[in-house]
Amino acid sequence: MAQTLTSIDPLLPLLRQAPLGVLSDIDGTLAPIVPRPEDAAVPEETRRLLRGLVEKGVRVALVTGRSLESALQIAGVEGVAFATEHGLRLWINSRLEAAPGLPEYEALAGQAQSELRQMELQMPGVQVENKGPLLAVHYRRAKEPRAARQAVLAAVERSAAARRFRLHEGRMVVELRPPLDVDKGTAAVTLIERLGLSGVVCLGDDITDIDMFAAAGRKRAQGLAAITVAVVSEEATPELLRAADYSLEGTEGVRWLLGELVRALP
């Protein structure tokens, strides 16, 4: 079970590792959760701290379910790597890499979106977001979120195209992802290896980040210095806290930690 992180002291041995990396989710970790996903943004103070880490030689990578275009806009920080769409696309050293087979699922996602709309899945507060090879159906703004979730799951079950995806759930969202062996965990492993990290801090707030925490744990067993931090909210699941070493309260806690890292690093 994660311990509440109230001091930078437990991380000091890790900070002696070089190269050091920070792998972080975006929404709910760096950027506050907002009713409409397109309105999200990383606060300027958090951006400043991320830039400070990059300037001190820390290799920062953002691991997110968002598309690359959306992630670049929301983060607003240069010099960082990205694993977007839960690892389906990687942006490392300004070079884009994609998992094999994505074009097929980009077309299929459009078909699934059309079928869901034909099933009248346009109830107030439900938003279908097409991210290219995957779909995210948000129901945060629905008047009755539980009923909206059930309606979304029922519509997915009735859609032939949607059933060809793997269904995942997060914070007030149902995601349809290609049935490929790619997730935030495989993305984290690739980033750790490609960035040549000797130590890493992993930050995440949602159940999808558990894969990243587990991957960091496996790499730790192989000699990597790694610490995982769960970002707590009212929507945080017990599984997330069990998977992490430490916990922080919300995006404000993350901002505190980033500031402590910047100050502690030479």
Image (cartoon, grey):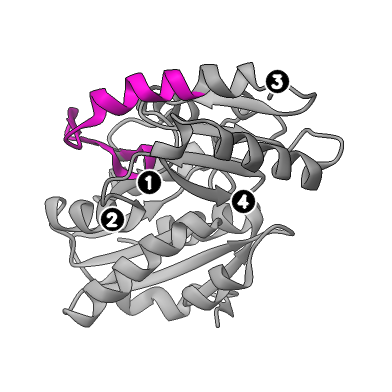
Residue behind mark 3:
120
Please rate how many residues cluster around mark 1, counting C-alpha atoms within 10 Å: few if below 14, some from 14 to 19, many from 20.
many
> Which of these two is toward me, 243 or 157?
157
**Front residue (pair 197, 35):** 35
First-in-chain label (1 vs 2):
1
**Callout in the foreground (4, 2):** 2
Residue 138 vs 180, above or below: the answer is: above
The reply to whether the magenta stretch includes residue 92 is yes
Q: Which tag is nearer the camera, tag 2 or tag 3?
A: 3
Q: Which quadrant: the N terminus?
A: bottom right
- Between disc 3 and disc 1, whose residue precedes? 1
Q: Amino acid at mark 2?
A: Ala
Asked if marks 4 and 1 touch (Cβ < 8 Å), the reply is no
Q: Position of residue 228 (x, y in %)?
A: 42, 69
Mark nearer the N terminus (4 vs 1): 1
Q: Earlier in the sequence, mark 2 or mark 3?
A: 3
Q: Residues within 10 Å of mark 2 (few under 14, many from 20)?
A: many
Cα distance, mark 3 to mark 1? 33 Å
- In the picture of the structure, the residue carrying the numbered disc 2 is 188
Q: CA distance from mark 4 to mark 1?
A: 16 Å
Viewer can see residue 32 = no
Find the distance from the CA under tag 1 to the CA under tag 2. Answer: 8 Å
| First reached walking from the N terminus: tag 4 or tag 3 | 3
16 lies left or right of 119: left
Mark linked to residue 251:
4
Whether tag 1 and tag 2 are in contact, CB under 8 A, the answer is: yes
**Residue at point 55% right, 56% down?**
206
Q: Secondary structure at mark 3?
A: loop
Q: How many marks?
A: 4
User: Mark 4 against mark 1, which lies toward the viewer?
Assistant: 1
Q: Secondary structure at mark 2?
A: helix
Q: Which residue is mark 1?
A: 63
